[in-house]
Image: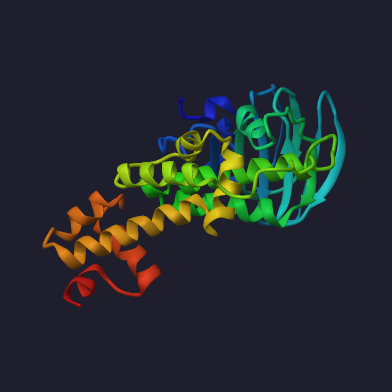
């Protein structure tokens, strides 16, 4: 699947008053495009886009007006406020002051997948607060700040969590959650879990998108993430990192393989990345672990 790019957005980010600090360009994110930038005051109209948009205001308050053919709504948006705009609709917007933002553009496929395959019509919101969406967008920005290819599974997890929350809390037609199907127990079956574990072991040194892990179980990504955590108590990303840490520790203890090669073989981008992760998980460096 092709990477989602700025060309799949509604054009806001291509305007001269936008100064991106960092974007997901070139990182291979397939259903999600994220950009963090400073915006100057402006008023403009933009055509519809195939992607859904959610903007997080990092500072403020700032006055925003929005509409379609005219500016019919106005609101003062505080720091942490959201601006949500659905795919397929044009937009006229006026920003009343300088603003730092995080933009996230999601494909309709991602939004549907997070909602059990059903279509989702997002509401046209601005000024709403949602601490979970705010934290997810800040986490995505943090991933861009310190990008490691091994974080691909984590990005997939964040993207699906963001899509799920938008579908649940920011749809135009709020619906009660579907009833929990009776019968099968929560969590992956032994067969499903073994299939995932084998895939992780076979691809430990490679990027492993969440959709490929889900495909091994025959579940959608959202179902897989929930059932995997019910089975293991860990998110797929946490499980993958733990297995990489375990494998690296084994090689460091039992072989004389260079630390840089251990890092590469176990899915870490480079030796410094392995060092950071071992410090975070075990409070030890690779060299100290080998000496011990």
34 or 67, which lies in front? 34
At 41% across and 52% down in the image, what residue appears?
240
Image location of residue 69, percent across then percent down? 83, 23
At 37% across and 49% down in the image, what residue appears?
148
Q: Residue furthest left?
A: 256
55 or 98, which lies in front? 55
Q: Quadrant of the C terminus?
A: bottom left
Q: Is residue 202 visible?
A: yes
Q: Is residue 138 left or right of residue 96?
A: left
Image location of residue 256, percent across then percent down? 11, 62
Q: Is residue 95 visible?
A: no
Q: Is residue 286 left or right of residue 167?
A: left
Q: Residue furthest right?
A: 72
At 64% across and 23% down in the image, what residue appears?
50
Q: Quadrant of residue 41?
A: top right
Q: Residue furthest bottom?
A: 292
At 80% across and 43% down in the image, what residue appears?
177
**In the rendered image, the vertical position of residue 60 relative to residue 227, given as above or below:** below
Q: Quadrant of residue 278?
A: bottom left
286 or 42, which lies in front? 286
Image location of residue 4, percent across then percent down? 51, 30
Q: How is the image coloured?
A: rainbow
């Amino acid at each position: 699947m092709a990477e989602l790019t700025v060309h799949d957005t509604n054009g806001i980010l291509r305007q001269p008053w936008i100064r991106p600090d960092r974007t997901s360009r070139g990182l291979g994110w397939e259903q999600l495009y994220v950009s963090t930038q400073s915006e100057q005051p402006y008023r403009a109209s933009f055509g519809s886009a195939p992607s859904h948009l959610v903007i997080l205001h990092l500072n403020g308050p700032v006055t925003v007006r929005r509409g379609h053919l005219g500016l019919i709504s106005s609101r003062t948006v505080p720091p942490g406020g959201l601006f949500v705009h659905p795919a397929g609709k044009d937009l006229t917007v006026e920003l009343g002051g300088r603003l730092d933002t995080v933009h996230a553009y999601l494909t309709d496929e991602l939004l549907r997948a997070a909602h059990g395959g059903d279509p989702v019509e997002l509401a046209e919101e601005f000024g709403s607060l949602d601490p979970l969406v705010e934290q997810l967008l800040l986490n995505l920005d943090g991933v861009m700040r310190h990008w490691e290819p091994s974080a691909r599974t984590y990005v997939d997890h964040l993207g699906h969590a963001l899509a799920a929350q938008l579908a649940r809390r920011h749809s135009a037609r709020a619906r009660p959650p579907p009833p929990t199907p009776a019968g099968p127990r929560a969590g992956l079956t032994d067969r499903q879990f073994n299939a995932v574990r084998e895939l992780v072991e076979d691809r430990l040194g490679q990027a492993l998108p969440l959709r490929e892990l889900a495909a091994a179980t025959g579940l959608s990504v959202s179902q897989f993430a929930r059932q995997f955590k019910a089975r293991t108590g860990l998110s797929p990303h946490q499980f993958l990192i733990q297995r990489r840490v375990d494998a690296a520790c084994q090689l460091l203890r039992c072989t004389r393989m260079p630390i840089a090669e251990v890092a590469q073989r176990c899915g870490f981008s480079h030796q410094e990345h392995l060092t950071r992760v071992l410090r975070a998980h075990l409070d030890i460096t690779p060299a100290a672990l080998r000496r011990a």
